[in-house]
């Protein structure tokens, strides 16, 4: 399959969708200053992202139906099913969050971080299927995820601490003579906070792009009959990368939010 293409390219409306996307811009050259004159905008991450969302919706419906049919059973079924998988992943996300921010905030922010965990994990795993591209290998997708965490961090930081959330960006008060240093600290903190969603997006995108590229190379070295057997070590390594990258994103997101909602208490102790 050509580079940058997937099974979604066989969709009957693919060419028309590319023409529609081209109206919003064309990809830049590597120097970032000039346009590719004959290149189409990349839309594979859009297809893949919508596919993952559809898959998650199906998983949610199956889980909800299973919960309603269980009638409060205390013991889970002996075999692993969709409901068990969802409970294990949600439980792991909650336990990770509880260790960082406490039980009450973890319960409150579980829908946000849990959604990120499911979307990123399923998106990463899609790249393990031959012929598919993970949506998280595109910076547009990962930056969007990082931007959601960025907005949530500061919105809930302002909600929890009010003006103290902005005040802490200036650093500790050093008196009238320290005002220039406080202003400098403010701009340094602004750059640091703005860099967070960018670093989240770049880290996830770069790792998933490299993982998918390595797996694609190994798949291309073998014939069709052995495509699932020869690169087994690469599949194992890719599975580890899929899980670790989802964990890292959720872990850092939880830390950022926990720091934002606890800023007022931390700085009150400093003063």
Image: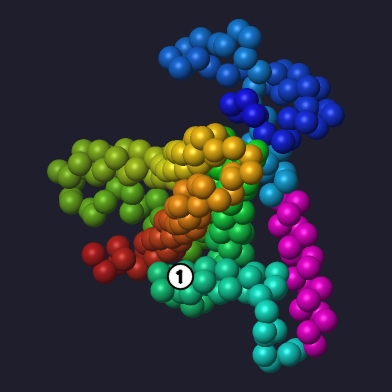
Label count reads: 1
User: Which is nearer the eye, 5 or 170?
Assistant: 5
Question: Where is 84 relative to 71, above or below?
Answer: above
Question: Where is 130 relative to 69, above or below?
Answer: above
Which quarter of the picture shows residue 2? top right
Q: Main secondary structure of the magenta part?
A: helix
- On the image, the x and y values in percent for residue 91 come to 56, 74
- Is residue 86 shown in magenta? no
- Is residue 63 shown in magenta? yes
The quadrant the C terminus occupies is: bottom left
- On the image, the x and y values in percent for residue 260 come to 42, 59
Q: Which residue is denoted by mark 1 in the rendering?
A: 96
Which colour style is shown?
rainbow
| Residue 161 can be seen, yes or no | no
Give the residue furthest to the left: 177
Left of 11 or right of it: where is 239? left
| Residue 43 can be seen, yes or no | yes
Per the image, label 1 sits on a secondary structure element best described as helix
Question: Where is 54 relative to 217, above or below?
Answer: below
Which quarter of the picture shows residue 262? bottom left
Residue at 78% over, 84% down:
70
Give the residue furthest to the bottom: 74
User: Which is nearer the eye, 122 or 185?
Assistant: 122
- On the image, the x and y values in percent for residue 106 come to 51, 71
Looking at the rendering, the stretch of residues picked out in magenta corresponds to 53-71
- On the image, the x and y values in percent for residue 151 come to 53, 48
Label 1 environment density (alpha carbons within 10 Å; few <14, some 14–19, many ≥20): some
Give the residue furthest to the top: 37
Residue at 74% over, 64% down:
60
Residue at 62% over, 14% down:
39
User: Which is nearer the eye, 59 or 94?
Assistant: 59
Residue at 76% over, 51% down:
54
């Amino acid at each position: 399959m050509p580079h940058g293409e997937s099974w979604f390219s066989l969709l009957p409306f693919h060419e028309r969708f590319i023409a529609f996307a081209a109206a919003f811009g064309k990809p830049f050259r590597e120097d970032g200053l000039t346009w590719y004159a004959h290149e189409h905008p990349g839309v594979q991450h859009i297809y893949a992202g919508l596919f993952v969302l559809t898959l998650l919706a199906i998983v949610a419906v199956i889980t909800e139906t299973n919960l309603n049919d269980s009638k409060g059973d205390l013991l889970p079924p002996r075999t692993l099913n969709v409901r068990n998988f969802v409970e294990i992943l949600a439980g792991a996300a909650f336990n990770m969050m509880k260790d960082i921010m406490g039980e009450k905030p973890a319960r409150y922010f579980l829908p946000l971080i849990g959604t990120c965990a499911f979307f990123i994990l399923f998106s990463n795993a899609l790249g393990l299927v031959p012929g598919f591209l993970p949506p998280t290998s595109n910076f547009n997708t990962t930056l969007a995820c990082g931007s959601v965490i960025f907005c949530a961090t500061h919105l809930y930081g302002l909600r929890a601490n009010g003006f103290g959330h902005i005040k802490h960006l200036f650093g500790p008060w050093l008196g009238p003579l320290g005002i220039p240093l406080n202003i400098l600290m403010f701009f340094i903190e602004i750059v640091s906070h703005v860099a967070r969603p960018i670093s989240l997006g770049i880290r996830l995108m770069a790792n998933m792009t490299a993982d998918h590229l390595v797996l694609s190379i190994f798949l291309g070295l073998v014939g069709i009959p052995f495509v699932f057997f020869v690169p087994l070590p690469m599949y194992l390594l890719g599975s580890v990368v899929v899980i670790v990258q989802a964990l890292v994103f959720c872990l850092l997101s939880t830390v950022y939010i926990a720091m934002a909602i606890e800023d007022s208490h931390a700085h009150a102790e400093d003063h």
